[in-house]
Amino acid sequence: MTDELEKLSWLFDTNDVVLKKTNASKDLLSIVGPSGVGKTALARILEDYSSKFYVVPNVTTREKRSSDFEFHFEYVSESEFLKMLERGDFFAARVGGSPCYGYKKTDIKNALSNNRICVFMFRYSGLKFFSKNFKNFKTVYLTSKAEIISSRSLDAHKRQTKSLTIEMQTKSEEVVIGLEEKGLSVLRFTNNYSGEEELKGMASAIIRQFYDH
């Protein structure tokens, strides 16, 4: 499975103005963790908690899941995704594996022009991409017990195994430690899946630690 993970790559347009702006900006927040750990639920709570947060819609070729929040995803076919990639629509796009994911330049530009904080939901490869290409961003790292996460994973093409969950968490941990060593802002949470109040507590801590200065 390691070889499959390493085939994943992120593409982005180095000449686009949005990249230059975000490289000097602190208005990027990544919520990181394997499928099933609660990224979508936390992102929704953050957006409800404060209008300053904007969850950048994720364009994806995967099927819709019951846990998906309506405004956080845009579902397209693989051929549509490739056309968008060829047109240069994406600020960043994950290719080299299935499903594909991408974030549109227009969505990020509109958010930044309105002084909103762009929230991204990533797994391992997205965090690795951000760590290599952006100097100023904040990270929320969500973890839980591997057996619980794998049981909650809802990938359409296959259920995430416990061993894959452990591997992805190990790889994410390595990147997170690297961010901490560079002095970048990281908050760690363990999701106990106890409900909305737990997520609200995380959202409150994110705002207090990252933005109430």
Image (cartoon, rainbow, N blue to C red):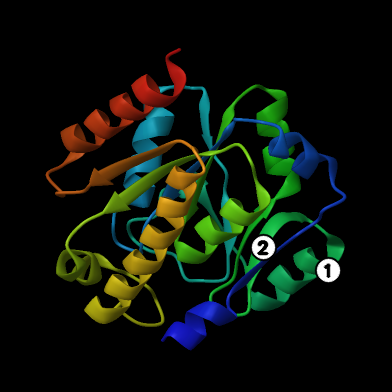
Quickly name the residue at label 1. Answer: 86
Give the amino acid type for the residue marked by disc 1 in the picture: Glu
Give the quadrant of residue 128.
bottom right
- Residue 191 placement (x, y as % from top left): 20, 48
Whether residue 98 is visible, yes or no, is: no
- Residue 112 placement (x, y as % from top left): 68, 29
Query: Is 73 placed above or below 204 here?
Result: below
Give the quadrant of residue 86.
bottom right
Give the quadrant of residue 136.
top right
Whether residue 113 is visible, yes or no, is: yes
Please, what secondary structure does the residue beneath circle 1 have? helix
* Residue in the image at 23% along x and 71% along y: 150
| Screen quadrant of the N terminus | bottom left
Quickly name the residue at label 2. Answer: 93
- Residue 121 placement (x, y as % from top left): 47, 51
As drawn, is 185 to the left or to the right of 128? left
As drawn, is 142 to the left or to the right of 177? left
* Residue in the image at 34% along x and 34% along y: 45
Give the amino acid type for the residue marked by disc 2 in the picture: Ala
State the count of labels: 2
